[in-house]
Image (cartoon, helix red, strand yellow):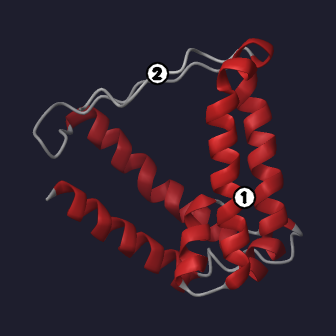
Amino acid sequence: MIKLFYLVLGTIFGFILSRSGAADYNYIQGMFLLEEFQLYGIIGTAVAVTAPGLFLLKRYGKTLTGKPLVIERKAGHRGNLYGGVLFGVGWAITGMCPGPVLVNVGEGKLYAVAALAGVLVGAGSFGTLYARLAGPFRLPPLAQGTGEG
């Protein structure tokens, strides 16, 4: 039941990304070239709506199963900087981050399949190479699983 709920939420989110232009290659490239400002408004609206909601959830919220909601702060490390740069370069080149990749695939855009392949190869490579990258990039130990069974 909960997985169906997440599937419905993801579908709604993808639909909103598609209809708002947030998954459109031309809008994203225009944003990075400072020629289109629509996405800055979308991102700003998302922050303005989400920030008070997260504040209230952290203060009074419970999970869907009734447990208290706990959002832990993650420690900063060198990998955040390198990962952020790598993410930004990939976003600028492809015009897509992971969510819009799936939206574009769903819209039938062939070039998105190449971006999806890049996301999967990159994530798989990172997972495979994590132990070797942990030392030089001072990454935290990798937690196995979600702890939720």
Q: Is residue 134 left or right of residue 44?
A: right
Q: Is residue 2 left or right of residue 83?
A: left
Can I make out residue 96 in this image? Answer: no
Q: Mark 2: which amino acid?
A: Ala
Disc sitting over residue 118 in the figure: 1
State the SS at label 2: loop
Q: Are marks 1 and 2 in contact (CB under 8 Å)?
A: no
Q: Position of residue 42 (x, y in %)?
A: 59, 69
N-term-proximal mark, 1 vs 2: 1
Q: Could you tell me which residue is drawn at 21 percent across and 39 percent down?
A: 61
Q: Position of residue 26 (x, y in %)?
A: 78, 82
Instruction: Check the image and report above or below for 39 versus 80.
Output: below
Label 1 to label 2: alpha-carbon separation? 24 Å
Q: In the rendered image, which residue does mark 2 sit on?
A: 143
Q: Mark 1: which amino acid?
A: Gly
Q: Nearer the viewer, residue 135 or 10?
A: 135
Instruction: Check the image and report above or below for 109 versus 72.
Output: below
Q: Position of residue 28 (x, y in %)?
A: 75, 72
Disc sitting over residue 21 in the figure: none
In this view, the residue farthest toward the right is 33
